[in-house]
Image (cartoon, helix red, strand yellow):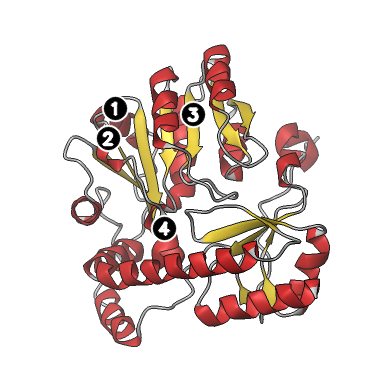
Amino acid sequence: MKLTVQQLVRPEIAAIGAYHVADAQGLIKLDAMENPWPLPIELQHELAAELAQVALNRYPDANGGGLKDDLRAAFSIPAAADILLGNGSDELITLIAQALARPGAKLLALEPSFVMYKMNALFSGLQYVGVPLREDFTLDLPATLAAIERERPAAVFVSYPNNPTGPRYARDEVMAICRAAPGLVVVDEAYQSFSSDSFMDLAGELDNLLVMRTLSKLGLAGIRLGYAAASPAWIAELNKVRPPYNVNVLTLAAARFALRQLGVFNSQAAELRAERARLFEALAALPALTTFPSEANFVTVRAPDAPALFQHLKASGILIKQLHGSHPLLENCLRLTVGSPDENAALLSAIQRFFA
């Protein structure tokens, strides 16, 4: 007798839903922390010519085809650190979880934070430990250190700055976590382009530190390129669970091209930081909203009725991220991606109409 799908699939997988990506067709898309600007037209033509020369009939260079050297130069990755490439930082989280998933091992993360930390613990069979943030989304360091001492996790994930809340924790707080953790500390710097601090300078120097980044928020979400920097010992072990051709030839070529145009993306990031400040100021001026500080390319707010405001914005042609219902600390919260000046103006106008 053949077994059914329900009999074969692990019950903890059957009990959850797939990661949901909302349909943004026809809407101003402010739900996924993307750079709002396409590649300038002249660079589109240059990239097209370069990609046309890629050998699509050949497997990618498993060592990155020179991209690691380009990343090291572009982002000042220390010589003491080795680099691991991933199909987005999502794959890097998966590789870390797979490598550490011995029986009884635990993965600890702050909450609320990036949902894929918890999901990958589930997928790989790690025990998950969540440590709640304070109500203002700051880090509860005593509770975090107590949980580390009690649980002895194989890995601690710290989103720096934190998604989906926005604040960046104090550097000395994260250093205290690194000193206390018995295992690997993953500092996820997906939003580093918009932040005032980074731990990259310590990659390869702190034995238990891995700094993880992505090119997605910089303006290259479509090519799915993540990278991690850590001591050679850690990268060597993680490489053992990495698929041999995990980054495709078009991504490698596009990423190397983009890094030669890094000034364009850095200028866009600077404009988004300025737009973030203007958006924050305008939102904070609305008495009905609680607006949380952000060092990412989004601003998180709490409204009296988040679902109603979400539906109003969608009816106004604007898609944002509804956080309400995903975690108790996110009750009535919404996450607003920082868009172009015109997109932000439309967003603010629609929010002001709702509260008028």
Indicate which label's residue lies in the foreground, 2 or 4. Answer: 4
Q: Are marks 3 and 1 in contact (CB under 8 Å)?
A: no
Label 2 – label 3 distance at C-alpha = 17 Å
Label 3 – label 1 distance at C-alpha = 14 Å
Sequence order check, earlier mark of 2 and 3: 3
Indicate which label's residue lies in the foreground, 2 or 3. Answer: 2
Circle 4 residue: 194
Dot 2, crowdedness within 10 Å: few (<14), some or many (≥20)?
some
Label 2 – label 4 distance at C-alpha = 19 Å
- The kind of residue on which mark 1 rests is Leu
| Vertical side of 212 occupied by 215: above or below | below
Indicate which label's residue lies in the foreground, 3 or 4. Answer: 4
Dot 4, crowdedness within 10 Å: few (<14), some or many (≥20)?
many
**Mark 2, secondary structure of its residue:** helix
Circle 2 residue: 202
| Vertical side of 89 occupied by 271: above or below | below
Indicate which label's residue lies in the foreground, 1 or 4. Answer: 4
Q: Are marks 2 and 3 in contact (CB under 8 Å)?
A: no
Sequence order check, earlier mark of 2 and 4: 4
- The kind of residue on which mark 4 rests is Phe
Which image quarter holds the N terminus?
Answer: top right
Point out residue 23 in the picture as x, y percentages from the top left corner.
68, 70
Query: Which numbered circle lies on residue 206?
Result: 1
Q: Are marks 3 and 4 in contact (CB under 8 Å)?
A: no
Sequence order check, earlier mark of 1 and 4: 4
Circle 3 residue: 156
- The kind of residue on which mark 3 rests is Val
